[in-house]
Amino acid sequence: MLVNKAGRGMTIWYNLVRTRIDLSVLEHNFRLIKAKAPCPIPVVKSDAYGHGLGAVATMLARCGAQTMAIGTVGEGMALRLVPFSGKILSLLGPLGHEDYPALWEYDIMPLVGRKEQLELLEEEGARQGTSLDIALALDTGMSRIGFTPKDMTWVRDWFRKSKWVRPYLACSHLATADEPESREFVLQQGRVFSSMCDSLEEVGIVFQRCLANSAAIQAYPELTFDAQRPGITLYGSSPFAGTSWEDKGKGFCPAMEVRTNIVSVHDLAKGAPISYGRTFYAPEDMRVAIVAVGYADNYSRGLSNKGEMLVHGQRAKIVGRVCMQMTAVDVTHIPGVAAGDTVYLLGGEGEHPISPEELAGWWGTIPYEVFCLLGQNQREYVGK
Ligand SMILES: *Cc1c(COP(=O)(O)O)cnc(C)c1O
């Protein structure tokens, strides 16, 4: 099993791309979340959405987070070694056999949604001689993982007999909380969740309820329940960008900025092609900058002829295909650009910083993926 030193040593090492994380911005976002989420379990899976597990978890613990959620059990072990002494929720739960003893050794609470997992946990509990808190995964409409309403009868019976497995949380996940037009489906998931939880409580099974993700924390106060699982708003992207609920995501600021350097600057004569496949021909005499970033740095080739960068505070459009480690941008309208200058791929100074939503739009994805991928570059921290 992979346990890396919590957010270090797993970055792309061969490039000039630098990802800067402002921890004071993350702290600001966390305070804003806490205004609506009384008992937040911040989600720090996937290296804290590319922001670095160690630094982010340390900041969150300092700001009072008592429980955090990660993905795999291996990530939970890395979080324990940060160190973090609070409760750790593993959203993927135990998969391989080696995961089971690790839950006890590292004191990790797994999300469990299959009968086989419950049975292996019961066996491991007997071996360890101590019980384990778990989170029950309830499928209320996402159809990804978890017990369904039909399973509730045997789940109730199973827990009445279990000696070593204690439900501490019941969790479900919302499929459409960020879509204003899908409000009815969200409320339907909420009703199914409540009735599944009620049916367990009726037989004396005691646990906390946890449903809301970032979007629901901001838009559905009626789904606050006992605990909440904020992710994307912590990292400063609004789940409602570009929707009629734009206002509900106000105030969150991106904490990640990504920059690199210019390799060379040259003229491109009218009619000349640039980069692989000649997908762009200069419509007039131009000046282009070759930037030290490409798809090997997780800057998607899908940005070819679509994306923009920030050069000297001004927007520069990508021309031609994104290569493995180089990308050309049009700097005809920007005076004084030279080799060695800094270029921002995300964020940046001045009035036109590149937002995660904008970059995701050019890329054909969502800010989550932009953060996870660009965050794999070498990180620097400010605002500690
Ligand atoms: C990732 C994740 C979250 C966080 O979702 P956001 O939309 O980033 O707030 C919450 N719960 C589960 C189960 C998740 O996998």
Image (tube, rainbow, N blue to C red):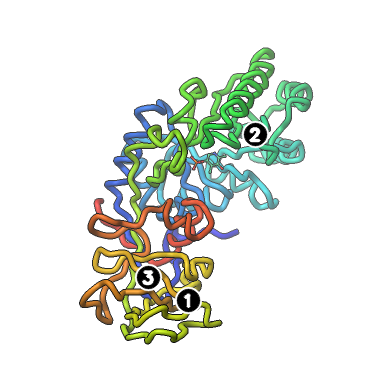
Picture residue at 66% right of the left edge, 31% below the top: 138
Picture residue at 31% right of the left edge, 74% below the top: 331
Q: Mark 2 and 3 residues: CB-CB less than 8 Å, in contact? A: no
Query: Would you name the residue on which mark 2 appears?
Result: 137
Q: Which mark is residue 302?
A: none
Q: Mark 3 and 1 residues: CB-CB less than 8 Å, in contact? A: no
Front-lying residue, 354 or 305: 305
Given this view, does label 2 or label 3 mark the residue nearer the observer?
A: 3
Left or right of 297, for residue 384: left
Determine the secondary structure under disc 1.
Answer: loop
Whole-percent x and y of residue 239?
Answer: 46, 41
Q: Which mark is residue 17?
A: 3
Q: Amino acid at mark 1?
A: Gly
Given this view, does label 1 or label 2 mark the residue nearer the observer?
A: 1
On whether ligand 1 comes within 8 Å of the CB at mark 1, the answer is no
Front-lying residue, 255 or 119: 255
Given this view, does label 3 or label 1 mark the residue nearer the observer?
A: 1
User: Which badge, 2 or 3, is on the more N-terminal residue?
Assistant: 3
Graded by Cα atoms within 10 Å as few (under 14), some (14 to 19) or many (20 or more), the crowding at tag 3 reads: many
Query: Would you name the residue on which mark 1 appears?
Result: 320
Q: Mark 1 and 2 residues: CB-CB less than 8 Å, in contact? A: no
Picture residue at 48% right of the left edge, 53% below the top: 78
The quadrant where residue 146 appears: top right
Determine the secondary structure under disc 3.
Answer: loop
Picture residue at 36% right of the left edge, 74% below the top: 330
Whole-number angstrom distance, CA of label 2 to CA of label 3: 39 Å
Q: Considering only vertical position in the picture, is 289 above or below 169?
A: below
Q: Considering only vertical position in the picture, is 336 above or below 40?
A: below
How many labels, in total? Answer: 3
Q: Amino acid at mark 2?
A: Ala
Whole-percent x and y of residue 84?
Answer: 41, 44
Whole-percent x and y of residue 85?
Answer: 42, 41
